[in-house]
Image (cartoon, coloured by chain):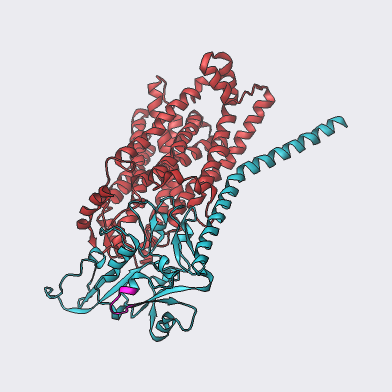
Amino acid sequence: MESNLKVIDKKVERRTFLKKIAILALAPIAFGLLGATDKLKTVKKWMLKNGYVPSNHKWGMGIDINKCIGCGRCAVACKNENNVPKVPFFFRTWVERYRIYENGEVQVESPNGSIDGFSNLSNSNRKLLRSFFVPKICNHCDNPPCVQVCPVGATFIGEDGVILVDSDYCVGCRYCIQACPYGARFLHPETHTAEKCTFCYHRIVQDKVPACVEVCPTQARVFGELTKKSSPLVRFLRMNKIGILKPSLNTEPKVYYANLDVEVK
Amino acid sequence: MEELIQHLTPILKEVWGYIFPNEIELHWGILIVLYPYLTGLVAGAFILASLVKVFNVKELQPTYRLAMLTAMAFLIVAPLPLLGHLGHPEKSYEILITPNSASAMAMFGFVYAWYLMAVLCLEIWFEYRRDIILWAQKETGIKKWIHKIISLFSKDISEKAIHFDKKWVKIITIIGIPSAFLLHGYVGFIFGSIKANPWWSSVLMPIVFLFSAIVSGIAMVLILYMIITPIRGKELDIVCLDKLASYLFYAMIIDFSLEALDFIHRIYESEESINILAYLVSNKLFISLIVIQLFMGMLIPLAMISLIKIFKAPSDLKKMVYFISAILVQVGIFSTRWNIVIGGQLFSKSFRGLTVYKITFFGLEGFFASVVIFCLPFVLLYLLTKILPPWEEARNP
């Protein structure tokens, strides 16, 4: 009888021991989660102070390729507004020029992201079939591969549909850069964290449009709500035939192109 | 920042076709080539060791403990290239405390910890326990204490206890095989699950990684065994070598078939990316993929080992061929990792252009840092063999 009791005692001891081990092992995760929720609260407070409620919005962008003249003002404005290093390796937005010749050859370029302007066409002997400019930007996908792969959850999709990076959390592993099919991300050379277009989040929470939209002289870019009927973006989507980039990847972009050409990838 | 700009500016001129402006900086360099190479050696060496314990391949007994220590030495070093590559290594603990459950990379810490603590450390401890206790009894001074501490002050070497040890070595090995598959298959998944990159995105990637890992692990243990044994003034066990070479051969056949399948499948499906990938293979990767990975690292060793087997060569010739084959295989597998990691970043996701990879020599992500990281496991292995001699004669009767 006594020995039986001892066995039971031992079993109980083992159980409490295992429990303690489990608590010890899980404690850092719990603390981490507490820290993360704390942080979320401060962000929410900041936004509410500005009268901005993310869940009331769903942002997107429309780009009319026929309207873009390739002036590159958007790329310049973006760099100024968002402190993007002014060297030709880092862009939150850029403009590509496509030239499609009669022999089927396609030439694409974006010298310094369009900031330096494009070379003259007249020197070419080949016959041009069609040519156009395509502004590129983070697509703020509803099914974002970058968010999926981030090991620490530093990049996330907000309730308003905008994909953001929390640079305090980003460890700089660059997995999100590899996962983005659109080349929209880069590693900031000074902060060593991932960077990308935020739709100028600091502006949209104050009811302003992103810098690139603001400066576009031809209104090729339209920014607005996706779910409100009165929004200029909804009108854009109603009035145009719409294309998105790389639809086969099922990323569900919220940047919509009017008059998109088959050659644009 | 100035340094980076100086590094990137000349690359602008070497770009072929059109690449997205953010793609001029190539993000995963030589350190990330080293990482799958090192973990592959871990998984491979462990699988080789498990052949002895689970599948009872007695001929490989002389390399069993060496293989375990090799796996350990490489596993300890494996996270270093990852850490060195992070923009913020000081924040790396976040991967453990706030992991994103959707991220394959977030699982790294858990897979690694599981493999290190639950598999390798435990198996080595149970395997060596009796010997460590007996060594500690004979020794004096610091060595005695090291062994006492490693044995966790256990003293029981009764038959029952030894039987218990043996049973657990077997159980851990059985758990260890899927764990080794997990460890390296997972590394393959990190690349294979990136749908944005057609060079990586393949369901075969984890399996190809796994078999190339087994190939590299067997070849590495073979090389180590063939170098260390003569240095120790001992005779090479030719039966063991034959067996090692046979398993190397089988693993290479599977690895080759899988890679061939992947290759044929890509060409046959001929998706949107096929033109740029074909251009990539025939230009930038021609030397490292066709010449080094395929011919030097695969076909030549396969041919050499088969000839030796068919014509029943004398043992001296055999040894030479095995050794050269294993070295070629190592170079080939390193090249495989290079072609996957670097190759996958040389073409633009616009599928319209190629960029170049310029390796730097100094700095944390440079050539010298990677040479140091590559040499570290061998230093560690040397230390491990001092503390836990894997040799037959060190075993207590």
Which residue is outermost to the right? A1
Segment tinted magenta in the rendering: A214-222
Q: Is residue B248 visible?
A: no
- Residue at 35% from the left image edge and 50% from the top image edge: B28
Front-most of residues B205 and A31: A31
On screen, residue B244 above or below A128: above
Total tally of numbered discs in the picture = 0
Quadrant containing the C terminus of chain B in the rendered view: top right
On screen, residue B89 above or below B383: below
- Residue at 51% from the left image edge and 35% from the top image edge: B49
From the top left corner, tell me how far across and down residue B27 is, in percent. Answer: 34, 52
Q: Is residue B230 visible?
A: yes
Which quadrant holds residue B159?
Answer: top right
From the top left corner, tell me how far across and down residue A24 is, in percent. Answer: 63, 41
As for residue A220 lying within the magenta part, the answer is yes
As for residue A87 lying within the magenta part, the answer is no
From the top left corner, tell me how far across and down residue B239 is, in percent. Answer: 45, 30
Left of B381 or right of it: where is A99? left
Left of B136 or right of it: where is A197? left
- Residue at 22% from the left image edge and 74% from the top image edge: A99
Chain in cyan in the render: A
| Colour that chain B carries in the picture | red
Front-most of residues A35 and B40: A35
